[in-house]
Amino acid sequence: MDFRPSDPAAERGGLPVTTKILIAGGFGAGKTTLVSSISEIRPLRTEEDLSDRSVGVDDIAGVERKTTTTVAMDFGRISFRSDLVLYLFGTPGQERFWFMWDELAHGALGAVVLADTRRLADCFAAIDYFEEHGTPFVVGVNCFEGALQYDPGDVRIALSLDPDVPVVLCDARRRDSVKQVLLTLVRHVLDLSPAEPDRQGATALSAR
Amino acid sequence: MAAPRDSWLDRDAGPVVRPYAMTKGRTVSGAGDGASIGLIDVVITRDQAPPEGFRLSPEQRQILAVSRQPITVVDLASDLDLPVGVVRLLLSDLSEHGLVTIRPARRAPVTDARLLRDVLDGLQAL
């Protein structure tokens, strides 16, 4: 029987367009909380093999070293329409899992670095990573109850951020607050885009 | 550990099938291993009969069943409770034999103004 897409919204061969945003930050900064505040599913957990990375396909000698050691990845999902789905991936914190960042960051729309003002230094590593890899990011200062409210400008100085990197105060538990952080990120990425679509269109027209 | 399910049971191997057993001992570091399959690439079954001589593993049968609706690689891994690396290898085989289509996600969304605007609109409408 021929396959018939049951989802009529499909633009490209019946398949939804997918994209992703990374949620980084130190341990306990609220990454999983942020994802669960806005995800349509409770944050799911899947696992990535850890041990098999450097073993050749037919390298039998390596077989006994293979283990089921895995690292968990948290992710959430927001379906905007039936044909556009945004994934949020919480990045694993420990440095030993950093090889996973390359995969997570590859093809990402951008990243949110969640900062906990009580432990600002915890997000230096993430900021360095995104700066080095050219991944657009915003810093979300998670305002925990009881934590002092900081001026975003002070946080910017403390983290020695480039002036164009947005810093926003947020509450990772509140959906609307998380929504604002994500909106800030997408607007920031749009600002960084080489050309607006209108201008591109005009250029294409004048070239004809 | 998750409660054992039938798909994890194997009389010879003991109570749990190791991931590398599901992949026939292959790992995720060589050619044709699915390493190019992205986490949010979309999988859909092509509803084809397996070619002569290709025996579907129980996990591959599960993948074919679940991906009757378009589904991303991470959602597949999560639904089937399998490591992403294992799912990639199984998908790589299925794709090679023409049993699934894997549509890659946009590799450079940062420069895709249309996509960015769609995401912006979507977020605003939440």
Image (tube, grey):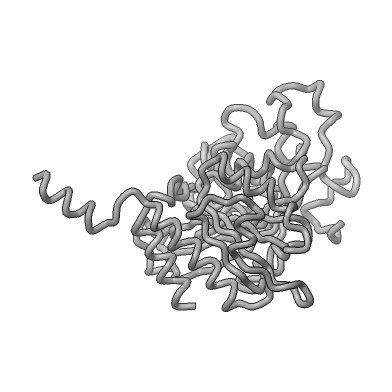
Q: Give the left or right position of residue A197, taking residue B113 as reference.
A: left
Considering depth in this image, is A181 or B21 the residue closer to the camera? A181
Considering depth in this image, is A170 or B70 the residue closer to the camera? A170
User: Which quadrant: the C terminus of chain A?
Assistant: top left
Task: Return the x and y of residue B20 as percentages of the image width and height.
Answer: 76, 37
User: Which quadrant: the N terminus of chain A?
Assistant: bottom left
Residue at point 69%, 58% (across, down): A74
Residue at point 60%, 57% (across, down): A156
Q: Quadrant of residue A68?
A: top right
Considering depth in this image, is A99 or B98 the residue closer to the camera? A99
Can residue B42 be seen at all in this image of the molecule?
no
Q: What is the residue that sits farthest to the right in this orientation? A: B14
Residue at point 40%, 71% (across, down): B121
Q: Quadrant of residue A147?
A: bottom right
Task: Return the x and y of residue A170 as percentages of the image width and height.
Answer: 62, 72
Task: Return the x and y of residue A207 as percentages of the image width and height.
Answer: 11, 44
Task: Return the x and y of residue A105 as percentages of the image width and height.
Answer: 57, 46
Image height check: is A157 above or below A48? below
Can residue B15 be seen at all in this image of the molecule?
yes
Image height check: is A51 above or below B91? above
Give the mark count: 0
Residue at point 59%, 63% (across, down): A153
Considering depth in this image, is A108 or B101 the residue closer to the camera? A108
Q: Give the left or right position of residue A138, taking residue B25 as reference.
A: left
Image height check: is A21 above or below B12? below
